[in-house]
Amino acid sequence: MKKYCFYLIILLFGITACNNSPNIPDVSKIPMEVEIIRLEQELEKVKTPNDIPKMARKYPTYFLDYQKRSGVPPQVMISDFYRISQSPYIDTLTQTTNQYFGDMTDVKAEFEQSFRFVKHYFPDFEPPAVFTNVTGYGNDIFVSDSLLIVGLDFFLGKNSPYQPPNVPEYILQRLQKNYIVPTSCLFLSNKYNATMGKDGTTTMLDDMIYYGKSYQFVRMTNPHVPDSVITGYTHRQTQEVQGNASFLWAHFVEKDLFYEKSHLVKNKYLGESPFTHAISSECPGRIGRWLGWQIVQSYLKNNPEVTLSELMNNANAEEIFRKSKYRPNAEK
C-alpha cells in the first residue's frame, strides 16, 4: 500500500488530543521571579556608538554570551549593535512587537509557572536570565545554562504583515506567542537529557527516546499546554497520528527501524519536514519523535515510581523501550 489514509480511524472514533499528566503537583509555594529584559526597547534608546558599551556593562550575561557565540571582536560587536539600533526597518519591527506583545506580563507569568515546575523536579535549577530582542539574527529561541533569548520577531503570528524570511509554512504554524514558553522548555530540557548512544553513535531508538524525553519534560513542566503545542503538530495532525499509532508502530517494526544508524534514514523519520515521505504524504514530519514520546509515556505509566529527574537521567534507551511495554493497540 503506497498511501495510507490517516482519516479512517478519526472518523470512526473521533480521538482528540489530551493532556496525559495525572497528579499535577502543587508548585504554588515555590518562589519564582522572572524578569524579562526587553533588549529591543533598550536599543531604541541608543543615540551614539558609545551607548553600546554602556548596555554591555548593564547586561554582561547577554553581551558576553553573544561575543562568545559570534566570535567577533568587541569593536565589531559595538558596530553591529549600533547599526541595528539605527535601522528604520528594525525600528518599525520593534514598534510592531511592542504593540503585539504589550508589557509581556502574560508571558512572564507563563515562564514563572513553568520554571516552578522545573524547580520542583530539579531542585538545583536556577532560572536563566530572559532577554527578548528584535534583531534579525536568525534565532527564534536560544537557551544556555544562564541565558534564554527570545526573538520576538519570530512569534508575531501568521496574521502579522511581517513573517520571518525563508521559514516554511509548516514551521510558521508553531511560531506563535503561545509556543514561546513550551519551546523554551524544550531547549532547556537538553541540559537534563542524558540519552546517549554507544560509542558516540546513536540508533533510531536512541534518538526517538531522546526526543520523547524532551517532549515529556515539556509536558510535565507545562501541564496545561495541549499536546499539539508540544509536538508542533496541528490539532488535526495530532488526532490523526493518535488514531493511527498502530499503523505507525507496524511500519517501524516491519522496516526494522529501531536500530537503524544511518543518518540519512534517521532523518527521514526524525528531521524537520512537512510530512514523512517514507510513510505517506498524510503523515506529518518528525513522526519518530512523536512515537518516541508515546514510548516514554508508556514507560512512565508502567513504572510510576520513576520521577522526571530519573527519566531524564536514564541514558539507557533500550531499557526505557523494554520497560515501556508499549503497544499502541493496548494504549488508552
Image (tube, rainbow, N blue to C red):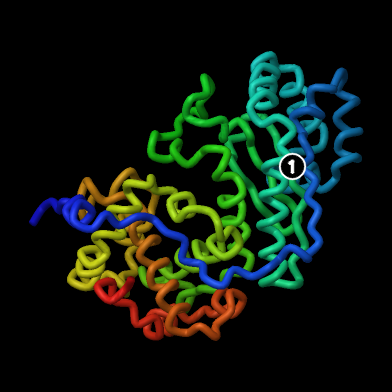
Residue closer to the observer: 166 or 93 = 93
Judge the density around disc 1: few (<14), some (14-19), many (≥20) Cα neighbours within 10 Å.
Answer: many
Residue closer to the observer: 8 or 230 = 8
Please give the count of numbered marks on the rendered protein: 1
Task: Name the residue rendered at 20%, 64% in the picture.
Answer: 247
Drawn side of residue 326 relative to residue 313, left or right: left
Position of the N terminus, as image quadrant, is bottom left
Determine whether 25 is above or below 69 in the image: below
Q: Amino acid at mark 1?
A: Phe
Drawn side of residue 292 relative to residue 184, left or right: left
Residue 314 on image: x %, y % = 54, 80
Task: Name the residue rendered at 53%, 62% in the picture.
Answer: 219
Residue farthest top in this picture: 88
Position of the C terminus, as image quadrant, is bottom left
Residue farthest left in this picture: 1
- Mark 1: secondary structure: strand
Drawn side of residue 73 relative to residue 332, left or right: right
Determine whether 236 is above or below 92 in the image: below
Residue 191 on image: x %, y % = 63, 65
Residue closer to the observer: 237 or 190 = 237
Residue 113 on image: x %, y % = 69, 56
Task: Name the residue rendered at 42%, 59% in the picture.
Answer: 18
Determine whether 156 is above or below 210 in the image: above
Q: Classify residue 299 by image quadrant.
A: bottom left
Residue 142 on image: x %, y % = 64, 47
Q: According to the image, label 1 marks what residue? A: 131
Task: Name the residue rendered at 66%, 31% in the picture.
Answer: 101
Residue closer to the observer: 202 or 111 = 111
